[in-house]
Image: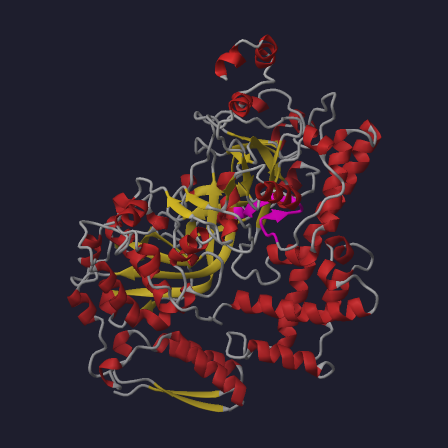
Amino acid sequence: GREWLAQQDSINQLREQGLWSNLNDRVIELSLYFTAAEHSAQQESRTLDRYEKAFKSGDINLLSCSTTMEMGIDIGGISAVAMNNVPPHPANYLQRAGRAGRRREARSLSMTLCKSNPHDQSVFLDTRWPFVTPLPAPRVSLDSAVIVQRHVHSYVLSRFLANVTQSGGQEQSRLTCGFFFLGKPSVAGDFSAWCRGFSASTVPQISLGIRQLLKHSVYEAKNLNRLMDLAAQEMDELTRRWRLEWEQLEAEAQEIEQKAGQQSPAYRAVTLHRERMEGEYLLRELAAKGFLPAYGFPTDIAPFDNLTRNQLRRFQQARQARDDNRFRRRELPSRDLTTALREYAPGSEVVMDGLVYRSAGVTLNWHIPANQTSAREIQNIRIAWRCHHCGASGSSHSLDRAGRCESCGEAVNPENQREFLEPAGFAVDFYQEPHNDITTQHFVPVEAPWIDADGEWFSLANPDLGRFRVTTRGHVFHQSRGVHGNGYALCLECGRADPMTSEGDLPRVFERAHYKLRRASEDGLYCPGSDTDWKIKQGITLGHESWTDVLEVQLKTTSGVWLNDKTAATTLSVAIRDSLAELIGVQASELGCDIKPARPESNAVCQSILIFDRYAAGYASSAERLLADLFRLVHDRLQCPADCDSACPSCVLDYDQRFITDRLDRHAALEVISSSWLNQMQLPEGLAFFGRGSKLEYKKLLEAIWHAVNSTHVNRVRLVAGGGIENWDLGPSPLRELAYRLAGQGVEVEILVPE
């Protein structure tokens, strides 16, 4: 066959023209070959439907799938599943492997490629891993105020929309953003007014429903009118941002129509985006913005606008989108903003459906800055800072405010200040077509987040062994500073951006006048930002700040020295994270862990251990009631059953930590959390009123007293501090705080401290 092909002049001519490939040769030779396609949630549903049909018919015999194939999609006739790495959890493995042999195939195969990282190699040595690893039973936590508030929003919005649809509105299953946010007055505005006018006496059924929803949660004693006001405020802010984006698209469409006409690609592109905004499924938009419960899916979704001129020409108006696909927003590929900062960052390359797209900029907050003084406020440019003295971090609008630490008052070093912009999304150049060369991809380095717990410190059961604090409003700052770590050059007019050079100079694209990122016309419309120096922002960081549950622990050794060994602290952070996940019955991947330098005393430095929720689910903040069991479990976990030299999957090494194996050493951690350390954590006999099983209660007990007093409406309270409580630093400060709070409600308080 090959000799015959070599003798065909017509085929050789087609080969020289690039019209005949090796694949055509294999067809003629009747050789086996693979026809592959990408099946991932980053693609349009119509594309996925086409690939699924082609796979079932045999036109495609290899699907490259993302993790979304684990559940919810059933494709029969799969005889083999090949995984290019070991899944992070046994449940993931069982879901993926179970895709093969579901239709009584004569034979089926599941094959896993184990890479050279420790997690994969450990599974390679113990292939029973997915079948013998126990799965923790799930539990329900009601400690997160954010999660409870979102469920209140869901309930009241459903009651409001029921009235709207009964009066002739759209069906609830097909509610669109255009229907809800547009119009004067808009449905969103009516919802806010309805919430503010709420009265428990006039709508007792809704009041009863909210009370049942709040039962045994952190909001059980919360005033209902206050909760409804919060719902109205969040909806007003969400509506304002949505309308700003839509109005900017409307203004751009009119401008392009006047200059280039309705037939220009730029006009059709902006019109398409406007239609996508209006047709977006409302409930998906509200969940993505954090107004409604996301049920484990990430919020703060950032789309990647990969629409180019040629794609627009091929785009079919009859399109279909899955309302429940959280990985595509407004029919565009999407990621949670934390992930998008590294995968979609300007200068990086994204592979989708066999094509390589280069990110060329960001989507601004859809309001072109009118002048230099208003640009910062309009684009929400902020300053993130981290104190080298005490380890605190935060953000502010002003350089003056960020000049000093809000916790200790020390001056913040300039290198620990980040002027950052939180992008609304990312985009490619409208006139730069993708290519299929994946040999030279560019990636943006991952940077560790800045985490700050804030709040009141509490001593451990033995104050000589350390302290801790928990919060449901911990501040987490994720950042991306480009491939060279010097930030980005960003045009505040059109959103075009590119990493600064390794020397900190402007990238080549801004050395001369540049085209608009998304709205340039075919004949080349230069961006007005090219003529104004202040509109080209240099060295800016792309960032995202969120507020979530955080546990911060600062430990002392048995000799009374603050823990300042980074290896031991990092290992303990992983062990505490994994042990806490086991105690509350969730996967360890739901929690993040890190360390940071801190100053617990004026003359001491230590490494703070930080455990935080990835999606504000109330996990980390529940640790205070589990501290006694938590440290015992940490000690047991460090006693590796495989007796490893430093770290392995049997103790503290898991999928998330595969890149920091050089900073994990269970022996260093055991020198801190030793048997003698645990013995010193026991309550002294004078305070162990219930025997050896006695546990120390922290501020949750005081909160319980506060809610009990509020619910029973008593007017006099006597608080008795246990013997020796002043010597243990538990007392007079939390008790005095509680007394002040009760006194503010008109309750007479008496505190007794026995001699």
Q: Is residue 509 left or right of residue 265?
A: left
Percent x, y of residue 91: 41, 57
Percent x, y of residue 195: 71, 70
Percent x, y of residue 395: 50, 50
How is the structure coloured here? secondary structure
What residue span does the magenta drawing correspond to? 325-337
- Choose between 555 and 455: the one closer to the eye: 555
Q: Quadrant of the C terminus?
A: bottom left
- Choose between 227 and 754: the one closer to the eye: 227
Q: Is residue 33 above or below residue 461?
A: above
Q: Which quadrant of the structure image shows residue 289?
A: bottom right
Q: Is residue 330 magenta?
A: yes
Residue 248 in sight in this render: no
Q: Is residue 674 above or below residue 262?
A: below
- At x 79%, y 32%, the residue is 256
- At x 40%, y 69%, the residue is 137
Q: Which quadrant of the structure image shows residue 429?
A: top right
- Choose between 324 and 638: the one closer to the eye: 324
Number of callouts: 0
Q: Which quadrant of the structure image shows residue 523?
A: top right
Residue 211 in sight in this render: yes
Q: Is residue 404 above or below residue 516?
A: below
Q: Is residue 718 magenta?
A: no
Percent x, y of residue 45: 64, 46
